[in-house]
Amino acid sequence: MSNIETVVKQIAPDDENALIQKMGLFGWTVISTQQVSDNYLSGESDGSITQHRTSFVKVMFQRNKEIKNYDKISNLEKNLFIAETCIKKVKKTIILTILAIAIALSAFIGGETVPALACLSVGVLFFILSILRIKKNNIWNNKIKELYNEIHTLMN
């Protein structure tokens, strides 16, 4: 059984250096990077054709499982991923709140009371959810700081 593990991450080009630094904290080293661009065409309803371009970077990392404190480091890495994912959910909820309230306002202005009330209800629900998640977000931010402090201690 190999004591080397490998992982590939896809990231926006602007975020490549930050990813490499973060992965380095957990004992990962870069094996390769690959800039990937994709061009494709899509047909529009008016008969026109639009060209689209997407771009991302594939970064391949490798880590030896026999590094000191491997189990703790691996666990900290998983916990950090969970914490960062929870923080991203807060941002999505806030965006949905703003969108629902904006739709409700435009429906009220347009004289559409029933759709406006429905959207406003959804907006209020998302607003309450946002407040709850923001409170939890502060807890996750503190957890992330603790995880980074612990990983620095283990790796030094």
Image (cartoon, rainbow, N blue to C red):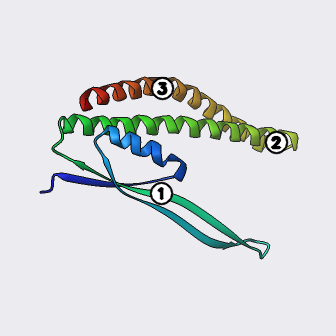
Helix, strand or loop at mark 2: helix
3 or 2: mark nearer the eye: 3
Q: In which quarter of the image is residue 127?
A: top right
Q: Residues within 10 Å of mark 3 (few under 14, many from 20)?
A: some
Nearest to the observer: residue 47 or residue 57: 57
1 or 2: mark nearer the eye: 1
Amino acid type, callout 1 = Val
* Real-space CA distance between mark 1 and mark 2, rounded to the nearest whole angstrom: 40 Å
53 to the left or right of 78: right
Q: Residue at x 34, y 41 (%)?
A: 24
Q: What x and y, as percent, mark residue 151?
A: 30, 30
Q: What x and y, as percent, mark residue 38?
A: 56, 68
Q: N-terminal of the two: label 3 or label 2?
A: 2
Q: Quadrant of the C terminus?
A: top left
Q: What x and y, as percent, mark residue 17?
A: 46, 45
Q: Residue furthest left?
A: 1
Q: What x and y, as percent, mark residue 117?
A: 75, 38
* Real-space CA distance between mark 3 and mark 2, rounded to the nearest whole angstrom: 31 Å
Amino acid type, callout 3 = Lys
The disc placed on residue 106 is 2
40 to the left or right of 87: right
Q: Quadrant of residue 82?
A: top left
49 vs 91: above or below: below
153 vs 58: above or below: above
Residue located beneath label 3 in the image:
136
Amino acid type, callout 2 = Ser
Q: N-terminal of the two: label 1 or label 2?
A: 1
Q: Residue at x 46, y 42 (%)?
A: 18
Q: Quadrant of the N terminus?
A: bottom left
* Real-space CA distance between mark 3 and mark 1, rounded to the nearest whole angstrom: 32 Å
Residue located beneath label 1 in the image:
57
Q: Residues within 10 Å of mark 1 (few under 14, many from 20)?
A: some
